[in-house]
Amino acid sequence: MEIINIKETTYKEIAEINKKVPEFGPYEQTYFEQRCKGKDPLLILAYVNKEAAGYVLGYNKYNDGSYYCWMAGVIPEQRKKGVLRKLMQYLETWAKKRAYSKIRIKTRNSRREMLSYLVKENFLFLEVVQFPKSIENRILLEKNIQEKEEK
C-alpha cells in the first residue's frame, strides 16, 4: 500500500520537483520566490513512500477572500495514486484555517486530466481566456471552501 505524506517545504525543493513535471518549464527558485513574495504563500510537497511525488504552490493573488493555487504538479510515475487529491485537501484545510472562502486555480484546455479532476472536485468555471489555438485557452475555476455551498 502506498503511503502519501504532505509537508510544507521550501522554494528550493519546489524548484527541484518542478523539473520532473513535464508540463512545466524548469523554473529557477527565484522565479517562485518573486511571484509569491509577501502574498501569504503555501508551498507543499507530497511524498509517496518517502519519495517526492508532487507539489502545490499557492498565494493570495486576488485579495478578495479567495486563495490562488498557482502551480500544482505530480511526477508522471506518481500519477493516479491520489497525490493531487492529498495536496489539494491540505491546501483547502490550510486556506480554511486562514479564513479564505474559496480556492481558485487556472489551467488550460490541453490539461485534460487536471480539468477532469477539478470538475469532479466541485470547482466551477469562472472565466475562459481565449488564445489563437483553443487548446491553449486558459480556464479559471473556483471552489467554495466554506461549510455551505453556493446555490
Image (tube, rainbow, N blue to C red):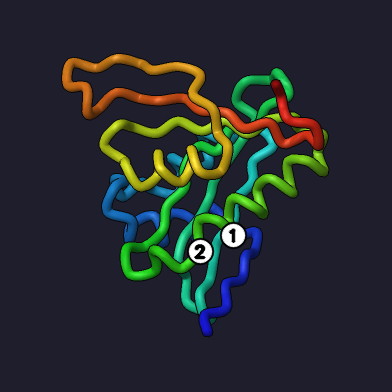
Q: Position of residue 8 (x, y in %)?
A: 65, 59
Q: Position of residue 81 (x, y in %)?
A: 46, 68
Q: Residue drawn at (33%, 70%), measured in percent from left and top?
A: 77
Q: Where is residue 136 in the image (x, y as percent from the top left)?
A: 25, 27
Which secondary structure, mark 1? helix
13 displayed left or right of 64: left
Residue 111 vertical placement versus 45 (above, below): above
Q: Position of residue 141 (x, y in %)?
A: 51, 28
Q: Identity of the amino acid at label 1? A: Lys
108 displayed left or right of 42: left
Callout 1: 10 Å neighbours few (<14), some, many (20+)?
some
35 displayed left or right of 151: left
Contact between marks 1 and 2 (CB within 8 A): the answer is yes
Residue 32 vertical placement versus 126 (above, below): below
Residue 2 vertical placement versus 70 (above, below): below
Callout 2: 10 Å neighbours few (<14), some, many (20+)?
few
- Say whether residue 100 is visible: yes
The residue that label 2 is drawn on is: 82
Residue furthest to the bottom in view is 1
Q: Residue drawn at (62%, 65%), measured in percent from left and top?
A: 6
Q: Quadrant of the C terminus?
A: top right
Which secondary structure, mark 2? loop
The residue that label 1 is drawn on is: 86
40 displayed left or right of 130: right
Q: Identity of the amino acid at label 2? A: Gly
Q: Quadrant of residue 109?
A: top left
Q: Residue drawn at (31%, 50%), measured in percent from left and top?
A: 26
